[in-house]
Image (tube, rainbow, N blue to C red):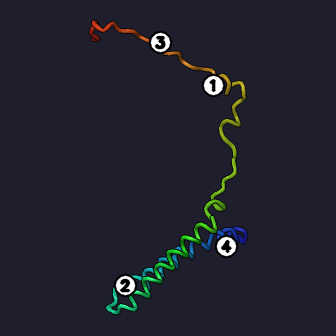
Amino acid sequence: MKQLLEKVFNKKISSPIFVGFGTFAIFTFIVFPGLTVANTILNILSGIVGLFTICFLYYYINMDKFVDKIMHIEPGETELDYISKDEIEKIKKKKTKKEKVIIHPKVKNK
């Protein structure tokens, strides 16, 4: 159980989730309400906060490359492991030859 919790709450897995929720919260509770206020200075400040949040998120995604680290899948067993090499070669060698049918242009097909 402890190993499972360590895998789930690993920094590589949990930090992108917290960054995503944090970005959502910043836009929901700071940027969008700040843009709807009648005060011009607050509109400008909330726009700047929104731009900094987008820049941080962009550089976080490009810098960390967490998708490649988490989604790395090692090759495992396939059904080809249980088939002998002779049978695989027979399957590869089987090719059906299609015969070319030449139809005279004046003959109508029924």
Residue 29 in view in this figure: no
- Kindly tell me whether residue 53 is visible in this rendering: yes
Q: Is residue 27 above or below residue 79?
A: below
Q: Is residue 39 left or right of 17 when viewed as pictured?
A: left
1 or 4: tag closer to the N-terminus: 4
| Dot in front, 2 or 3 | 2
Name the spot of residue 52 as percent of width and height, x first.
51, 79
* Disc 4: which residue: 11
Which residue matches tag 3? 99
Label 2 is placed on what type of residue? Leu
Q: Nearer the viewer, residue 53 or 84?
A: 53
Instruction: Quickly name the residue at label 2.
Output: 35
Residue type pointed to by label 1: Lys
- Report the amino acid beneath label 3: Glu
Please tell me which of labels 2 and 3 falls first in the chain. Answer: 2
Q: Name the image quarter holding residue 28.
A: bottom left
Which element type, helix, strand or loop, lies under badge 1? Answer: helix
Q: CA distance from mark 4 to mark 2?
A: 34 Å
Locate residue 91: give its quadrant.
top right
- Determine whether 77 is above or below 71 in the image: above
Mark 4 or 3, nearer chain start: 4
Label 3 neighbourhood size at 10 Å, few (<14), some (14-19), many (20+)? few
